[in-house]
Image (tube, grey):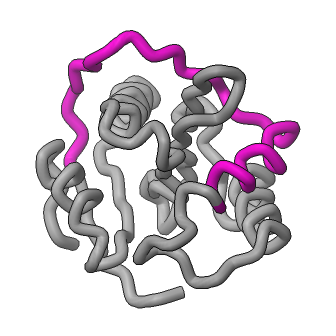
Amino acid sequence: MSKRVGMIYKLIPQELEGTYAFDKISSDDIHELSISMLEAFKDTTDFDGETLEELNEEIYSVIESTFGTFISDASFQIKQNGEIAAVILISLYKDKPFISELFTAKKYLKLGMASNLLKKSINTLLNLGYKDLVLYVHPENVEAINLYKKIGFSAL
């Protein structure tokens, strides 16, 4: 994995925009999530040449809590036309909620899905009693960094 920039956010309630349906995530979704993730990351600064099998293992480690405790109540997917359009996976890392994955399939970019997923997770984490949310982002992923800053994340 390439070098990442850490960011933290002190949770405050967020207003959702749009009318997306937020579906829960289970271990039955791992393969489909991996396919969507590969499509989303391929040819971007976040892509390190991972294979579909490697992404399956990565997502499995998050959902099955081998990476850290998976917070299923704060992890969601948005489906469009029967396919996964955008995903957020939240785990506990060093006793704080951590964005393990946040991605949007390329054909669904710029529709506010990532922003709404993030806001939905923030509101859920607040309801669960958490105070902070942490993430690590590739320093060249300017669009993601701008989204996080717009929501209120700051450097760790």
- Residue located 45% across and 37% down the image: 108
Position of 14 relative to 67 (above/below) = above
Of residues 73 and 59, the one nearer the viewer is 59
Position of 111 relative to 69 (above/below) = above
Total numbered badges shown on the rendered structure: 0
**Direction from residue 15 to residue 118 in the image, left or right:** right
The N terminus lies in which quarter of the figure?
A: bottom right
Residue 129 in percent (x, y) is at 39, 33
- Residue located 64% across and 21% down the image: 81
- Residue located 42% across and 33% down the image: 117
Position of 74 relative to 151 (above/below) = above
Residue stretch rendered in magenta on the structure: 10-38
* Residue 24 location, quadrant: top right
The C terminus lies in which quarter of the figure?
A: bottom left
Of residues 147 and 108, the one nearer the viewer is 108
* Residue 116 location, quadrant: top left
Q: Residue furthest top?
A: 19
One can see residue 115 in this view: yes
Residue 49 in percent (x, y) is at 64, 83
One can see residue 126 in this view: no
Magenta-drawn stretch contains 15: yes
Of residues 137 and 156, the one nearer the viewer is 137
Magenta-drawn stretch contains 76: no
Residue 13 in percent (x, y) is at 22, 25
Residue 122 in percent (x, y) is at 35, 35
